[in-house]
Amino acid sequence: MHADKKINSVPAEFVDLAAEVLSLLSDPTRIRIILTLDAAGELSVGELAQAVAKNPSGVSQHLARLRMARMVTTRQDGTRVLYKLADEHALSVVIEAVRQAEHSVASAGQLPLHHSHEA
């Protein structure tokens, strides 16, 4: 690997890691989990599963990957484990991806939804 190379002043290793982050966030269930945790603050696996309409074991696996990437953290509350976003960065990536998606589906000459709120 050429760790000394930079792309637009970003070290190459961070470009590679950024690709891994984007890959991790490319799953619709994980995007829903991020958005739900932003709205709710903290939730258990069962609560998240209900909110994203998926089974708890699948949501648990998604949460494990997000936790390994340090995008979510946990807190013990008696016998329950509560999940929350570790910081705002994963949410920012998701929001920007949603905004880009709005551009993709907007008709020619039509402003995407997020632009109409900025005016």
Image (cartoon, rainbow, N blue to C red):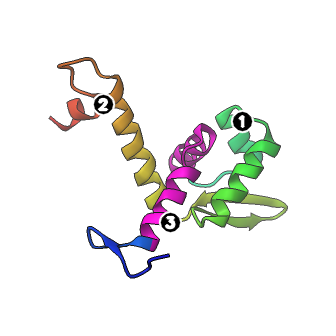
Tell which residue pokes out farthest to the left in this image: 119
- Amino acid beneath label 3: Leu
In the picture, the quarter occupied by the C terminus is top left
Q: Is label 3 in a helix, a strand or a loop?
A: helix
- Is residue 87 something one can see in this rendering? no
Tell which residue pokes out farthest to the right in this image: 79
Q: Name the residue: 72% across, 35% down.
A: 50
**Mark positioned earlier in the residue sequence (2 or 1):** 1
Q: Answer few, some or many: residues within 10 Å of disc 1's Cα (few below 14, many 20 plus, some between 14 and 19).
A: few
Gap in Å between the C-alphas at discs 1 and 3? 31 Å
The answer to the question of whether label 2 and label 1 lie on touching residues, with beta carbons closer than 8 A, is: no
Gap in Å between the C-alphas at discs 3 and 2? 26 Å
Type of secondary structure dominating the magenta stretch = helix
Q: Residue beneath label 3, please? A: 17
Q: Magenta part of the protein: which range?
A: 13-40
Q: Nearer the viewer, residue 117 or 41?
A: 117
The answer to the question of whether label 3 and label 2 lie on touching residues, with beta carbons closer than 8 A, is: no
